[in-house]
Amino acid sequence: MSLYFKYLQILFKAQMQYRTSFWLLTFGQFFIPLSVFAGLYFLFERFGQIKGWQFFEVALCFAVIHMAFSISECFARGFDAFSSLVINGEFDRLLVRPRSTVVQVLGSKFEFTRFGRLLQSVIVLIWALTNLSIDWSLMKVITLCLMVMSGVLIFTGIYILAATMCFWTIQGLEVTNIFTDGGREIAQYPLNIYHKWVVKFFTYVIPFGTVNYMPLMYILKRFTLYSLIKY
């Protein structure tokens, strides 16, 4: 892990060589999901609720998945850009080094500007939690933390699976964006508003439903035995 943190330190110093560019990019990343959240806000302003879900309940769902995505995009960007290592022959250099290949690929690229996106998600999360009447317990706090952590692991896992395909395709497959960007867009709403095949796909194949929707129902006390069987 010391090597991993060394990579973090080196790349952070490198990006801070151009401080104005760094802060402008971070500022821009703050407003990218804000425009999406504004669309969500005006949607509820017009219709009031979506299939029984209120605005702040969906805002909590939105915040969790965007937090997970921004953290994964920041620290697992090396796998997302893995195709460039293969094309340029730089991956061969990693193989001859006496260190873990996974750690070296993870440490090859970090997007610290994604903290702007993370900050926006944290603000939405705090706003949603302060406007929801949740009967908090230690288990619910742990569940909320695990929702974010599990989302990070799923997004990172998709990046790793896409990176493995680069040995045969050389270029990274754009189809993975269906599961990363597309999965993020779908999971920012409760899954039960979609068709059943979408719910099943994003529960049993790409398990965003077990990260976001089902734990959210538990936190909000909407998870009954009947809904579990129906789900």
Image (cartoon, helix red, strand yellow):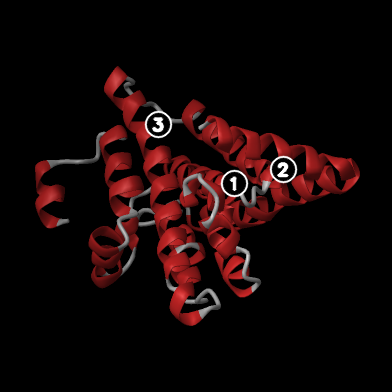
Residue at the limit of the structure toward the top, as seen here: 138
For residue 46, say whether it is visible.
no
Quadrant location of the C terminus in the rendered image? bottom left
Q: Which residue is mark 1?
A: 107
Q: Nearer the viewer, residue 106 or 59?
A: 106
Residue 171: horizontal and vertical position, in percent?
55, 78
Q: Earlier in the sequence, mark 1 or mark 3?
A: 1
Looking at the image, do the residues carrying marks 3 and 2 touch, with CB atoms under 8 Å apart? no
Could you give the CA–CA distance between mark 3 and mark 2, rounded to whole angstroms? 27 Å
Q: Amino acid at mark 2?
A: Leu
Looking at the image, do the residues carrying marks 1 and 2 touch, with CB atoms under 8 Å apart? yes
Above or below: residue 190 compared with residue 16: below
- Point 46% across, 42% down: residue: 64
Identify the element where label 1 is drawn.
loop
Q: Amino acid at mark 3?
A: Cys
The residue carrying pointer 1 sits among few (fewer than 14), some (14 to 19) or many (20 or more) residues within 10 Å by Cα, namely many
The residue carrying pointer 2 sits among few (fewer than 14), some (14 to 19) or many (20 or more) residues within 10 Å by Cα, namely some
Q: Amino acid at mark 1?
A: Gly
The residue carrying pointer 3 sits among few (fewer than 14), some (14 to 19) or many (20 or more) residues within 10 Å by Cα, namely few
Q: Which residue is mark 3?
A: 145
- Point 25% across, 72% down: residue: 197
Q: Nearer the viewer, residue 171 or 125?
A: 171
Q: Which residue is mark 2?
A: 11
**Image side of residue 195 versus residue 53, left or right:** left
Could you give the CA–CA distance between mark 1 and mark 3, rounded to whole angstroms? 25 Å
